[in-house]
Image (cartoon, rainbow, N blue to C red):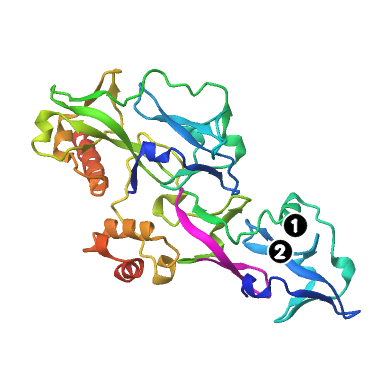
Amino acid sequence: MHLLRATELIGRPVVTLGGESDLEVKDVVFSIISGRILGFTLRKPGLLGGPVDQHLPWTEVHGLGPDAVMVPGPDALGTGDELLADGDDVIGDRVMTESGTDLGEVLEVVVATGRRAEVVGFEIEPSAVVRSDHAANAFIPLPDTLSISGENVIVPDSTTDYIGDDLAGFGSAVTEFRSRLREEVV
Amino acid sequence: MRWHDVRGHRVVDTTSAEAVGTLDGLVIDPDGHRVADLVIGDRVLCWSDSHGIGADAVTVKDPDLLREPETDQQRRAVDGATDPVGKAVYTEDGFELGVVEDLEFDADTGAVEVLATATERIPGSRLMGLGSYAVVVRSTRRDGDGSSRQAGTPTDSTTSSTSPSQRDLGGLSRDELYELAQQRNVRGRSKMKKQELIEALS
């Protein structure tokens, strides 16, 4: 699992599978309801580049990696403002366990790249409780579905067993965390 | 056959023995992974109409076989917009593999065999698209043939079932190799160079 912070995608080219690119990622738009990525706002690259009236809905992304966002073709881009976020984004929310422990504040959204790109975790500024065991910034894996209110993100209690200190080893923590959640359901 | 070696070759009409132009470009069919036409000046010559690309010249039996470009692909190739040399290679899942330095193709069939960057030899069969911005190639990562979605799909990235040969591994970037090494828990992987990763994974 190759992971990156969602904001690392800003400035990356949006490239069609035909090898054309006119635009790059201006910003990442998150859904406050699901905590997932809705899509990307776009801009023209370069000094003269500015915002454009086009966006890229998440559902049209073919593949996403550290160097580019790949789309099937120019038709993948939408126009207008239908992509506008359904509220403030998740950055700055407090992460709380189901039993009420504050884990910290969301700094960044962590994305697994590839053809099945998805949001897999948050980078957080840990609360005092978490900080005693972890580095300055910590990474928490997310379950497949999330409860988000606009101020708080609620995560399962078992999340605390899978808090990571760096992005490098975080992929396996995500995988282990999710398989444990599935076992608990069964 | 390397594009670097034949680019600029004279094109000679074997009937009159006169030069009719120079080999300036290639029209590449990304779906068929092959050279479809040769670009000679502002005209194109269908691959199957060329008599052959020799060591010193391209020969053609009849200069009338050189035609005006008709398809969009041909026009863009004549304009030089789709020459892969100098363009960045991206995988379909957004990894850059370097800049194309040369192209190797089969002298008989025109099949594109290798896209060569400074560090990689990417099999031509991975070619997906060739535009004015970049060359796009198929991903070799195991989730490469899945559909794009995010929530609700647990990834099975840790259960590696494939065991690519060293030859296949040569087409991967260091990042991709490192990821494979992560999956197989290869010790000391973070300090390995690309070639060492290939050997450890073979």
Residue A43 in magenta stretch? no
Label 1 CA crowd tier, 10 Å (few <14, some 14–19, many 20+) = many
Highlighted magenta segment, given as a residue range: B94-117
What quarter of the picture does the C terminus of chain B occupy? bottom left
How many marks the image carries: the answer is 2
Based on the picture, tell me whether residue B114 belongs to the magenta stretch: yes
Residue drawn at x 43%, y 21% is A85
Q: Amino acid at mark 2?
A: Gly
The amino acid pointed to by label 1 is: Val
Image x and y of residue A78, in percent: 57, 29
* Helix, strand or loop status at disc 1: helix
Q: Which residue is mark 1?
A: B78
A117 vs B100, nearest the viewer: B100
Q: Look at the image and tell me whether residue A61 can be seen.
A: yes
Q: Are marks 1 and 2 in contact (CB under 8 Å)?
A: yes
The residue closer to the viewer here, B91 or A24, is A24
Q: From the top left corner, tell me how far across and down residue A58 is, in percent.
A: 47, 33
- Residue bearing mark 2: B25
Chain-order first, disc 1 or disc 2:
2
* In this picture, residue B20 sits left or right of residue B108: right
- Residue B78's spot in the image, x, y percent? 75, 57
The residue lying at 35 percent from left, 61 percent from top is B177
Q: Are marks 1 and 2 on the same chain?
A: yes
Q: Chain of mark 2?
A: B
